[in-house]
Amino acid sequence: MSIVIAGASIGIGQALYQQLKRESLDAVYTISRRNTGSSNLQADLSNPADIARVREFLQEIQPSQVFCCAGQLHDQDHMPEKRLSQINDEWIFQSLRANLLSHIHLAQALDPILTRKHALKWISLSAKVGSLDDNALGGWYSYRMSKAALNMFIKNLSIEWARKSSDILVASVHPGTTDSELSKPFQSHIVSDRLYTPQQTAIRLISIMQRLSSAQHGKLLHWDGSVIAY
């Protein structure tokens, strides 16, 4: 069995790689936009031009588990929008590239490899703030919209891939607020026992992956495996 972690250079992806290398007897492979010592393939999943190279890589290793950790909340020039007037078209497009298209392109790279006999579990890192039912505060327009779009993609993908094989399971997961570059500007507002270490989050995600069931297929899951309404 082989495991692929996409977006493995920092944060949760890097913690997943380290944890799986410690506890797993399976082969662990990584795809990263940045050139890191642990990267097996350097590729930009937000760029459709890299799909063919990623497909060749996946064809060779035939993954049975995929963690797609690609995502972005802010950069040095953009923070989450608090009001309508702060929405910027280019930043919406960038949010969609990072939080949605990267997952789509990885799935497109993997799709031709899957057969009726292929057993696969796939987890995409999403966010509870992408849930329409959970949104009581507003704001964070680009991030919320891109994660909501990711959740819809996972729902669609679960239906299409179920037609390929009954042994394929996909879900999106809210990992909880993790101590990472993504959450760092907002950690002062987080209760200490609800700010999780990357290792805690990695262990939880591995547990969800191992226990992923047909009842969770196509769903948005909390880090404890419970279902969050879309």
Image: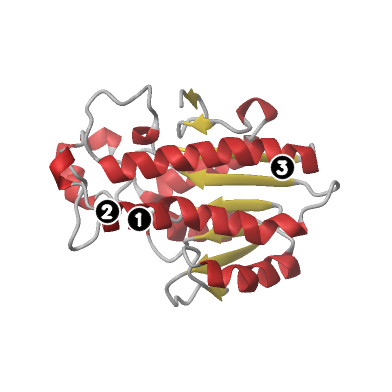
In the image, residue 22 lies at what x, y percent? Answer: 55, 58
Q: Position of residue 130 (x, y in %)?
A: 38, 35
Query: Which circle's residue, 3 or 2, is located before the other in the chain?
Result: 2
Q: Would residue 225 be found to the left or right of residue 192 on screen?
A: right
Front one among 43 and 195? 43
Residue on which disc 1 sits: 93
Rendered view: 84 above or below 38:
above
Residue under numbered circle 2: 89
**SS class of the residue under badge 3?**
helix
Q: Quadrant of residue 222?
A: top left
Where on the picture, by quarter, is residue 5? bottom right
Q: Residue furthest right?
A: 117
Q: Is residue 192 visible?
A: yes
The disc, 1 or 3, on the residue closer to the chain's N-terminal end is 1
Secondary structure found at label 2: helix
Q: Helix or strand or loop: what does disc 1 sit on?
A: helix
**Residue at 63% in and 57% down:** 108
In the picture, the quarter occupied by the N terminus is: bottom right
Amino acid type at image mark 1: Phe
| Residue under label 3 | 161
